[in-house]
Image (cartoon, helix red, strand yellow):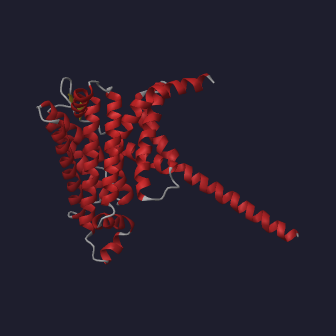
Amino acid sequence: MHWLLRILNILIGVIPGAVSQGVLWSLMSLGVYITFKVLDFADMTVDGSFALGGAICASMILKGWNPFIAILCAIIAGLLAGMITGFLNTSLRIPAILAGILTQLSLYSINLRIMGRANLPLLNSKTMFDLINGMIQSITGTRIKAQYLVLVVGILCAILVIGILYWFFGTEIGSAIRATGNNEKMMRALGQNTNHTKVVALMLSNGLVALSGALVCMDNGYGDVGMGTGAIVIGLASIVIGEVLLKYFKSFGMKLIAVVVGSILYRIVVAVVLQLGMNADDMKLLTAILVAFALAVPVIAEKFRERFGKLDYEYLIEKEKDQ
């Protein structure tokens, strides 16, 4: 009972911050969802493009640029990173995983060049959240707590991104991307340029990842060359958790929402575990266990269903013979 009360107290304390972080990271998870689930393309660029968004945002803000322009430049850089991966795969015939790894590897050096050093703190610089808070204060006379402002802005961004993605994947090019992920050979037989659809999907995915990196950078108050390390695993964990919890919802829109829900729940679990005293160095191990568990649950459930279903079937046969 004591442990239960302690966990409840921790939940009450960490939920606002964990949810706000989860919403910002969910944009990265949506980008991962596009490549891994929709396109069926194992894109490893994510770790590099996430840090790329943060690096560009931090360096531009420190040089006096408007944070909104910095975010726009981060998105454009992410689009270019995705285009490079697409070019390596489609034009040079480099395997998908290797193409992503090559881009990710090169982005590490590029990010260092952009920032000039490994870490850039935004100590006295105004971020997008500061500007929005200033506007709210000038209108209402009150200033919103930073944690809740990030939460509201993050939710609005997630809603906007989900709406745009839902619309985009209903268009001709979006439907072509989904069809390419389902059956690339069939799309080629129908005369569709699958190389084009792959590049577009990779650009869209890494643009979202870079956007997430820029927002996380401003929320954390610094840009770091290693801030994207493990981002791909976090994105996959969010996708798997969301799919397991909302597995009965089959519509595309609900699948996108499930990714956001999975990202939020992942962040809540991480925050609670850290508050309970887990070493931060073990977080990668925890993430791996969470992903493995979430992936194993449907398989184990199906095996139990098959086992008990078979037993019930055999029992009915035996009962019928006895009669």
Quarter that holds the C terminus: bottom right
Residue drawn at the location 37% of the way across and 35% of the way down: 20
In percent of width and height, residue 203 lies at 24, 55
Q: Position of residue 33 (x, y in %)?
A: 37, 53
Q: Can I make out residue 220 in this image?
A: yes
Is residue 210 placed above or below 13 in the rendered structure?
below
The N terminus, quarter of image = top right
Measuring 18% from the left and 52% from the top, which residue is drawn there?
A: 80
Q: Residue at x 55, y 23 (%)?
A: 6
- Image location (x, y in percent) of residue 148: 35, 30
Q: Is residue 230 visible?
A: no
Closer-to-camera residue (160/19): 160
Q: Is residue 147 left or right of residue 122?
A: right
In terms of depth relative to the viewer, which is nearer, 249 or 53?
249
Residue 280: quarter of image: top left
Residue furthest front as drawn: 140
